[in-house]
Image (tube, rainbow, N blue to C red):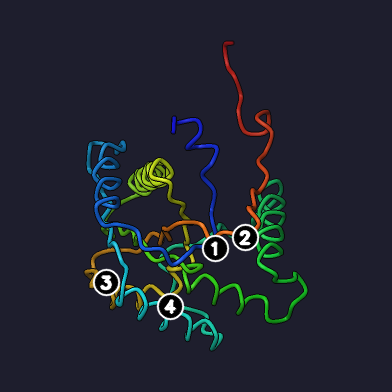
Amino acid sequence: MDVYEAVDSRRAVRAFSDEPVPREVLERVLTAATRAPSSGNLQPWHVYVTTGEPLAELKKRATARALAGDPGDERQYPMYPSGLASPYLDRFSDAAAQRYKALGIKRDDPDRPVKIAALNAEGFGAPVVLFCYLDRTMGPGQWGDAGMYLQTVMLLLRAEGLHSCPQVMWTMYRETVSQMVGADDDLVLFCGVSVGFEREGVPKLRTGRADLAETVSFVGM
């Protein structure tokens, strides 16, 4: 699989099979991903690869919190900026409607927030979840580095025939996650990334993207 194919085929999959992911594959991906760029070569990320019984217990605890309507732990950073306006709000709303319609959750369903939280807390059935942390002393530049690192990981997963779904939702239950993975108090949970093989027979949703002219300006060409 070449780079263009990996980029084009990468999408947030929300229906995984229970087929296990070999450890050697994960090690190969994460070893290669160390070549991702980071300012000053700080490599500020710390990843906990979670699977098996620990992940099953974590999913159980997080799902129980979601079904109980738990609003989540105190946020360490905002998931989205306040006062989100057009065109960003439009893109967000359209994508959300597409995603959860594909999962059978209607927009006017009064239980929609709880159902969405519960599906996320199950990692959409993924047998592996990577939890990416940063030292709390890191700044915006290092958070950007972590994003480039995770994109590298997700593209390498495609090269291995695997899919992924990045989930900032896990930060809602960050205390439960940290207890299960043993993360130090000086680390901040950036997000989780569910990993696995896509479940067969599920519609393959691809959310739209803005036209190039909306997001790119060519200067001097």
The numbered disc on residue 92 is none
Residue at disc 1, secondary structure: loop
What residue is shown with label 3? Answer: 181
Q: Quadrant of the N terminus?
A: top left
Q: Amino acid type of disc 1? A: Ala
Q: Amino acid type of disc 4? A: Asp
Q: Position of residue 57 (x, y in %)?
A: 35, 81
Marks 2 and 4, the one that precedes in the sequence: 4
The crowd level at tag 2 (other Cα within 10 Å; few <14, some 14-19, many 20+) is: few
Between 127 and 129, the one nearer to me in the picture: 127
What residue is shown with label 2? Answer: 202
Q: Position of residue 39 (x, y in %)?
A: 29, 37
Residue at disc 4, secondary structure: loop
Residue at 37% of width from left, 77% of height from top? 56
Marks 4 and 1, the one that precedes in the sequence: 1
Q: Quadrant of the C terminus?
A: top right
Give the distance between the C-alpha atoms of the residues marked 1 and 2, in whole angstroms: 7 Å
Give the distance between the C-alpha atoms of the residues marked 2 and 3, in whole angstroms: 31 Å
The crowd level at tag 4 (other Cα within 10 Å; few <14, some 14-19, many 20+) is: few
Q: Position of residue 36 (x, y in %)?
A: 31, 38
Q: Nearer the viewer, mark 4 or mark 1?
A: 1
Residue at 40% of width from left, 62% of height from top? 192
The crowd level at tag 1 (other Cα within 10 Å; few <14, some 14-19, many 20+) is: many
Residue at disc 2, secondary structure: loop
Residue at 63% of width from left, 76% of height from top? 113
Marks 1 and 3, the one that precedes in the sequence: 1
What residue is shown with label 1? Answer: 15
Label 1–label 2 contact, CB within 8 A:
yes
Marks 4 and 3, the one that precedes in the sequence: 4
What residue is shown with label 4? Answer: 73
Residue farthest right in this picture = 108
Q: Nearer the viewer, mark 2 or mark 4?
A: 2
